[in-house]
Image (cartoon, rainbow, N blue to C red):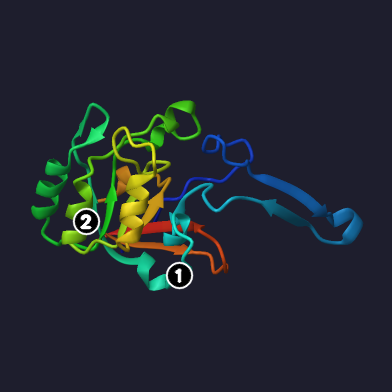
Amino acid sequence: MNEWIDLSVRVKKNNLNFPDDPPLEIAKVKSLTEDGFNLHQLSINMHVGTHIDFKSHMSAKEETVEFEQFMGKANVIRPIIVNGVVSTDDLIEKYRNLTYQERIVLLDLKHADKFNTKAYYDYITFEPKIHSFLTENNIYLLGSDLPTFAYFKENDYRMHKELLKSGIYLLENLTNLTKLSSHIYLLALPLNIEGVDGSLVRAIAKNL
């Protein structure tokens, strides 16, 4: 039986957060010695650690998020990167050559080893034509070992806006993708919290 592989980064107080985002705060509000039990309070934005971006991250429109959208068979693809930009043509070719073509795609870009360093936020970008590839193949969840998804030289969150508007959720800050085969089963369930624009997830996968 194939073992589950943890794809989630460890959330810690000393992690470097996305530039200009508020940092994680963990406060002990009850103690075992004084209160008979320990209790911690977290102040955390929904985009710390491994997380899903919801459509409302870039829209004022409310949405209903169903957990079924974040579980199922998926493909892991390792596309060529040219001058810091993912080659869409290579991505398309590798997707077409897969024995099983799924509607969840994870991109192993070998970026996770830079996590918790400043270099992590000098991230790989994409060509705008990736949007057509994703929509034409009805892909509804795109994940990677990047802190965010952005088009090359983008400055207006265009990639987020286009993909989320097209119903493509974004799974960011993944790790351990190098341990996966090209065909996996993925679980990346968001927390059931009302009124948020994204959610931390515990992403796990097993090779098929």
Which residue corresponds to the image point at 25% horizontal and 33% vertical from the top-left?
Answer: 85
Question: Is residue 4 among the parts visible in the rendering?
Answer: no
The quadrant holding residue 112 is: top left
Please provide percent x and percent y for residue 161. Answer: 36, 52
Counting labels gives: 2
Question: Amino acid type of disc 1?
Answer: Glu
Please provide percent x and percent y for residue 160. Answer: 36, 50
Residue 52, compared with residue 144, is above or below; it is below
Which residue corresponds to the image point at 51% horizontal and 58% vertical from the top-left?
Answer: 199
Single out the mark in the foreground, 2 or 1: 1
In this view, the residue in front, 153 or 145, is 153
In this view, the residue in front, 75 or 32, is 75
Residue 153, compared with residue 133, is above or below; it is above
Which residue corresponds to the image point at 32% horizontal and 47% vertical from the top-left?
Answer: 159
Distance from Cα at disc 2 to Cα at disc 1: 21 Å
Judged from the image, the secondary structure of the residue bearing numbered disc 2 is helix
The quadrant holding residue 170 is: bottom left
Q: Which residue is mark 2?
A: 134
Q: Which residue is mark 1?
A: 63
Which residue corresponds to the image point at 16% horizontal and 60% vertical from the top-left?
Answer: 136
Which quadrant: the C terminus? Answer: bottom left
Question: Amino acid type of disc 2?
Answer: Leu
Please provide percent x and percent y for residue 131. Answer: 23, 51
Which quadrant: the N terminus? Answer: bottom left
Q: Is 31 on the left-hand or right-hand side of 18?
A: right
Judged from the image, the secondary structure of the residue bearing numbered disc 1 is loop
Mark 2 vs 1: CB contact within 8 A: no
